[in-house]
Image (tube, rainbow, N blue to C red):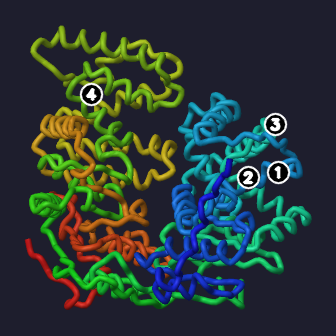
Amino acid sequence: MNYALRPVANGCDFAAELNPEQYAAVTTEARHALVIAGAGSGKTRTLTYRVARLLESGVAPWRILLLTFTNKAAREMLERVARLTGRGSEQIWGGTFHSVANRLLRRHASLLGYMPGFTILDSDDQRALFRALIKQITGKSSSKERFPKPEVLISLHSLAINTNRSWQQTLSDDYGHLERFEENIAKIFEAYRQRKMESNAMDFDDLLTNLVRLLRENDDVRNDLQDRFLHVLVDEYQDTNTLQAELIALLSGGDHTSLMVVGDDAQSIYSWRGANVDHIFNFNLTYPDAAVYKIETNYRSVPAILDISNAAIAQNSRQFVKTLRPARCDGKLKPAIVPAPDNRTEARFVAQRIDELMADGIPGKDIAVLYRAHFHSMDVQMELSRNHIPFRITSGLRFFEQAHIKDIVAWLRLLTNPRDEIAFRRIVSTFPRVGDATAAKLWQGWLAAAEKWFAANPGTTTITAPHSEVMKKVSVPTAAKLYWGGFLSSMDSLHPADRELTPTELIKLVQNFMSAHLRATYDNYEERLEDINQLTRSLADMPDLDTFLSQVALLSEVDNDTVAADDDCVTLSTIHQAKGLEWKIVFIIFLGEGLFPHYKVISGGDTDDLEEETRLFYVAITRAEDQLYLSYPRYNGHSYDSQYCPPSRFLTTLPEELFELWNI
């Protein structure tokens, strides 16, 4: 029997399939190359064709290392390489920094004191270990004040590693409100390190730190890997942190190793998680012989949108200067700037315009609403729900499904309905050392006292007497005694004898009660406070508490019961989450000075921070293909608590001929 092999593809016609900018980068003979690929310019295509070119030039696949930030990106590129070359791509070392580190450490872990079969702690494993260590080290003292939750300590630990700082410095710089716990945090972090070694386990940060340590300390391993990898390619280089940059340098440091990094300085927006834009700016200092290639032809957006994006990023003084040029010549609508009287009206505009677009045949999946902070989306979520426009949120939970918002609402529910067991148990479960069993005992005591009150006051549905009096005979388990009195006093303050508080006033009081819980529970507690502040501003004109709670319940019911086909769902997302995505129509909301750019960036006076905000605005604009709407509320709120919002500097610096002004 004869067995026939499939014919190998004749190869790519690179010159025909790439534009001149892409072709120059793909075919470069430079040992070190920096490719600045503007938004929508075919960055992935360039990197993919570069790998294909190397293979067709005779480079063995196992001598190519492709580093990415997501498994999806690596998988898609390798699949495209296989289609282009007609060869399997299994032997190419392609994957995320962490996955490549894992493969290499499996071979050499013994040199670091690990056994080859080490396990990797996922996020649940980390939380469980930190939870056990907190209990072991703080003991009963943790009940006296709210010790940070495992998630907060994990974030502190990881940020220190990824920004190449000591955890003490990171604590001082970014978690100053936790400095009073420094002694116990030190013990927990040391115990965490020891327990991982004893368990022959690494967390995700260890994968990178240990590989860097392995390469620094073991010349034979480092030289072997540098000889193995003739070509190192890196995607999204502007997003690398200090550890990743050092790892790239160590792996590509061979005498004959070629390094190509691809990225866009104008899309560097992740400094808050350790990314350092200096790596791409200083590439030529690190590698003086590097060739620089710019890819500026944009295949995504219509010319009018590119004009806006070019004008926006031109405000930054520190950048690789480039001008995105359109491959498209269609599109008649100029981007619109839409000032709204207030945040509710802005949301009504967005919902109505989306409704019109969908009525004209635009699928919901082609429309996105983008914002800097998650709380900016609250009014739009409510307005879309009221108008039965289905939406998905990629930046987190729907506003009223977030834990801290549900905690706030639970206090108000219990105030209006003392028989609400779910609300009661949610509140007391925020007390340190109060678990399900203690919460159940407290509930039985609370309910018995409440029923006694109602029996003595027929016809009432709420407790109007001081809770500290009504509940004074409740038997309180030891675990809850420290916080029970404060809880009852707080409930008393929610219904003063002389008047009925407005929903806004009630929420502000509950926010004060919960501030210690928020600080100890969430590493982003300041963002959670902004959510709550937005809640008070947006609901300032609610006539009473019952109306507010009914509206929340009805909105939640719409959220849960609306099941839409993918084509019908509008996307709501923070800009950070939207990077790398695109839609035909994009709304960017809350473009008020102090909202975007954020007031902390403005007041901080740091030029680098402000330039990153500008890059964030640029990323948002360049997500749009056909239509772009830029809106802001002149006032955020409806009462004495409303904020005046002048237009963002990102809008006022745009040339007037580039946009239309839509007056509502």
Q: Earlier in the sequence, mark 4 or mark 3?
A: 3
Residue 477 image point, x, y percent: 49, 16
Q: Amino acid at mark 2?
A: Arg
- Nearest to the eye among marks 2 and 3: give it: 2
Which quadrant of the figure has residue 71?
Answer: bottom right
Q: Tag 4's secondary structure?
A: helix
Q: Residue at x 22, y 73 (%)?
A: 627
The percent coordinates of residue 575 (x first, y second) are 38, 64
Which element is circle 3 on? Answer: helix
The residue that appears at 30% across and 74% down in the rendered structure is 593
Q: Nearer the viewer, residue 297 or 459?
A: 297
**Residue drawn at point x = 66 percent, y = 55 percent:** 98
- Using the rendered view, name the quadrant where residue 240 is placed: bottom right
Mark 2 element type? helix
* Residue for point 70% across, 68% down: 64
Q: Quadrant of residue 615?
A: bottom left
Q: Earlier in the sequence, mark 2 or mark 3?
A: 2
**Image location (x, y in percent) of residue 169:** 67, 62
Residue at image mark 4? 414
Distance, label 2 to label 1, CA atoms, is 7 Å
**Nearer the N terminus, badge 4 or badge 2?**
2
Alpha carbon distance from label 4 to label 2 = 53 Å
In this rendering, which labeled residue sits more in front, label 1 or label 4?
1
Residue tagged by mark 2?
103
Tag of residue 107? 1
The disc at residue 198 is 3
Residue 319 shows in the view: no
Q: Position of residue 349 (x, y in %)?
A: 13, 63
Q: Is residue 476 above or below residue 21?
A: above
Kind of residue sitting beneath label 3: Glu
